[in-house]
Image (cartoon, rainbow, N blue to C red):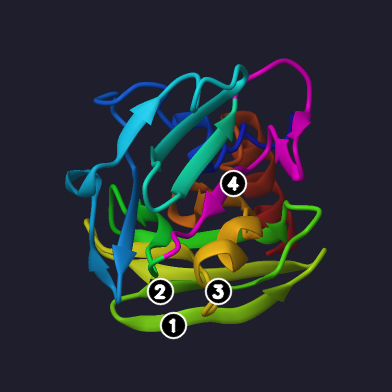
Amino acid sequence: SMFGTAQSAVTYDPVKVFPSIEGVATTPFIFDFFYNYNALGQGFGYAFGSPCDGIAGLSCLSNGFVESSIVKYVGAGSGMERGTVNYLADRLNLHPGKFGEVARVTFVAPNAGSFNFKGEFSAQDDSYGSTIVGARNAGSFLLEAALLSSGSRAFDFDVDLTTGQSVSFFVDRNGNFLGAHAFDSTGLKLSVTDLTSVQTPVPEPATWALLITGFGLAG
């Protein structure tokens, strides 16, 4: 070929690294919950479990008392439906808690660079109510929107990050309390691409020779 092979961009997907048991490395993502933007974490009684609440085909980080969870479909095929909730293999289901616990997936930059965040939030419950979905970086909102029944909210944006800086994606119950929050299962499909990992193709030696010869003839 005229040019050498370009290096493929490095892409991260939280579905691929979501652990099926507690303690499995999840780098570069953190899966947790927070209340009024103060992290609750697993110390609030959350635990990874597979199967999730005894349901085959699901793996989850959950707290049964407040009913908040992050769930991954791990069965065969493209997904499954249980009750009114749809689980798809290409996304995580985030569910806020009844007392205001917000489900969150956070990307922590493993290196400095420019990162592209692309994906969507989607209503995954046939009886979906309403939620607030969004993304935050350094205390500022990159995205904040209301998600209504059968709706979705796509996003595609770039952020420059230093090593250790983060972007968090969250689902809030939008004021739904007790029973009303029970239908707020929200899908998060996310792909994070390290744009600085893409290298410009370099001409191979034979191509350089032709280019140099061409420059000489042109001169």
Q: Amino acid at mark 4?
A: Asn
- Span shown in magenta: 74-98
Question: In the figure, residue 47 lies in which quadrant?
Answer: top left
Which corner quadrant holds the C terminus?
Answer: bottom right
- Numbered circle sitting on residue 141: 1
The residue indicated by pointer 4 is 93
| Residue at x-position 67% and y-position 47% | 211
Which corner quadrant holds the N terminus?
Answer: top right
From the viewer's perspective, is the residue at label 4 or at label 3 nearer?
Answer: 3
Q: CA distance from mark 2 to mark 4?
A: 19 Å
User: Where residue 101 sits: x, y (%)?
Assistant: 37, 63
Q: CA distance from mark 2 to mark 1?
A: 4 Å
Above/below status of 2 relative to 159: above
| Residue at x-position 29% and y-position 47% | 110
| Residue at x-position 67% and y-position 60% | 120
The residue indicated by pointer 3 is 176
From the viewer's perspective, is the residue at label 2 or at label 3 nearer?
Answer: 3
Tally of marks: 4
Label 1 neighbourhood size at 10 Å, few (<14), some (14-19), many (20+)? few
Q: CA distance from mark 2 to mark 3?
A: 22 Å
Mark 4–mark 3 CB contact (< 8 Å)? no
- Secondary structure, mark 2, is strand
